[in-house]
């Protein structure tokens, strides 16, 4: 059994604005991990890395982004607008002691450059398992199943499915029957995400890992 101090996980979502950053903060806090957002497109005044730093304790180490892009659009377009070429060979995993949480950008099929290099290609290159973040809305069953299907076809292991919001049996049962995961976690929606909320949810996630060790 892999020990809790040796986890490297990619936090991916079924789309954008799903809750990846909050889930990344929760998992990073639970594992006292290093956090890395390789590509940040837009929101540079309060980037995802800044949010994780604000939400987490000093035991979480936030690593610098590889690419900081100005416009909140798909990374390939944001890079083009900035006159930057994202090199698909420029994403070697950082060497860290202990755990590593990597947050993706948008959904799995988001293009990173104009050659057709997608985020899922990067995950496949890293050979890391994915924590897939889903959120209940009209159409989310389709988006979740498509995401799980492409992960399966790409040979990428799903470590955990995280459902954001109140449990929805009608939606979740379809997903879990088609792709029964080893781990399912529910993270509630709150009016304000803060350090106390992240710490509370991190305790739940940490207990999941402690049961495995």
Image: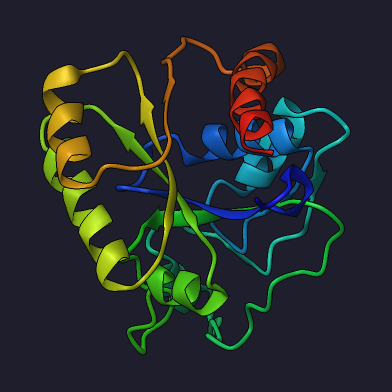
Task: Classify residue 140 by image quadrant.
Answer: top left
Q: Residue at x 82, y 28 (%)?
A: 57
Expressed as whole percent of the image width and height from the top left, the position of residue 52 reads: 68, 36
Note whether residue 54 is visible: yes
* Front-most of residues 119 and 71: 119
Left or right of residue 17, residue 65 in this image: right
Residue extending farthest to the front is 1
Left or right of residue 17, residue 51 in this image: right
Expressed as whole percent of the image width and height from the top left, the position of residue 182 reads: 40, 41
Left or right of residue 70, residue 181 in this image: left
* Front-most of residues 128 and 19: 128
* Front-most of residues 97 and 5: 5
Left or right of residue 70, residue 36 in this image: right
Task: Classify residue 4 by image quadrant.
Answer: top right
Image quarter hosting the C terminus: top right
Name above or below for residue 52 compared with residue 166: below
Note whether residue 51 is visible: no
Expressed as whole percent of the image width and height from the top left, the position of residue 94 reads: 76, 69
Q: Residue at x 62, y 56 (%)?
A: 37
Name above or below for residue 197 compared with residue 210: above
Q: Residue at x 58, y 54 (%)?
A: 9
* Front-most of residues 35 and 184: 184
Label tally: 0
Display coloring: rainbow
Expressed as whole percent of the image width and height from the top left, the position of residue 157 reads: 42, 60
């Amino acid at each position: 059994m892999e020990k809790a101090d040796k986890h490297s996980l990619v936090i991916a979502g079924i789309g954008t604005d799903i809750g990846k950053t909050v889930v990344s903060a929760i998992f990073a806090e639970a594992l006292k991990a290093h956090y890395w957002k390789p590509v940040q497109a837009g929101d540079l005044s309060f980037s995802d890395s800044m949010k994780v730093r604000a939400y987490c304790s000093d035991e979480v180490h936030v690593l610098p982004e590889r690419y900081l892009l100005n416009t909140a659009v798909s990374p390939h377009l944001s890079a083009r607008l900035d006159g930057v070429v994202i090199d698909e060979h420029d994403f070697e995993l950082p060497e860290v002691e202990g755990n590593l949480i990597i947050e993706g950008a948008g959904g799995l099929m988001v293009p990173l450059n104009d050659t057709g290099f997608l985020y899922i290609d990067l995950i496949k290159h890293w050979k890391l398992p994915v924590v897939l973040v889903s959120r209940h809305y009209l159409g989310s069953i389709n988006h979740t199943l498509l995401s799980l299907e492409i992960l399966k076809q790409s040979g990428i292991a799903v470590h955990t499915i995280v459902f954001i919001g109140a449990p929805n049996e009608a939606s979740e049962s379809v997903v879990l029957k088609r792709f029964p995961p080893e781990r399912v976690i529910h993270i509630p929606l709150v009016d304000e995400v803060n350090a106390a909320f992240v710490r509370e949810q991190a305790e739940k996630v940490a207990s999941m890992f402690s049961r495995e060790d």
